[in-house]
Amino acid sequence: MPLSDLQYLMHQLGPAMPEILTVFQMESDCWELTFEGDISVEVGWQDQPPRVLFNCSVGEVPEDLREPVYARLLVANALPPDRLNLRFALNFTDEQVLVLGELDETDLSLESLCSELDEFLKCAVMISSFMADSAAVNEDTSFDAEPANAVMSQLI
């Protein structure tokens, strides 16, 4: 699939997914999609190997919870792609956790792009909620790993 096919699909994506608030083309091969709840997903194109990349910042982990949360995210990164086709990273400049996804379908259709983006968004929202819940639990009481593990176990 060439970049021009993705550009064409991105022009159709907004009307096809009513949950998208805005589609902003940052470069010829990169778009930012915003959704309710201050969630934004960057969609980009990679030439070699050809694939669509998804990237979403989901929040910062409170300092005293980093070890258990990062450990769970590392476990998730080690899972085979057929179990969890996502990866997690850390943006060192602002310590935000990133959810990364990729799509390497050669014949990408609008329907498959919408479906993959919807699944990616569900995961990003779940991880974002996990981060917010971890921070709230940390402020109220001592951290109990069980609720956090229950949320993460939905992913892995």
Image (tube, helix red, strand yellow):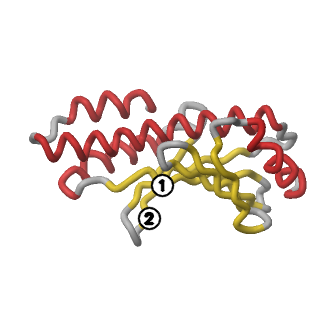
Quadrant of residue 142 in the image?
A: top left
Which residue in the protein does label 2 denote? 91
Residue type at numbered disc 2: Asn
User: Is 61 positioned to the left or the right of 48 in the image?
Assistant: left
Circle 1/circle 2 CB separation < 8 Å: yes
* Label 2 element class: strand
Q: Nearer the viewer, mark 1 or mark 2?
A: 1
Total numbered labels: 2
At x 60%, y 34%, the residue is 119
At x 71%, y 62%, the residue is 30
The correct choice, above or below, for 56 with respect to 146 in the image is below
At x 48%, y 55%, the residue is 57
* Image disc number at residue 42: none
Mark with earlier residue (1, 2): 1
Q: Position of residue 63 (x, y in %)?
A: 22, 58
Rate crowding at label 1 as few (under 14), some (14 to 19) or many (20 or more) other CA atoms within 10 Å: many
Q: What residue occupies the far left of the structure in this picture?
A: 142
Q: CA distance from mark 1 to mark 2?
A: 9 Å
Which residue in the protein does label 1 denote? 57
Rate crowding at label 2 as few (under 14), some (14 to 19) or many (20 or more) other CA atoms within 10 Å: few
* Label 1 element class: strand
Quadrant of residue 147 in the image?
A: top left
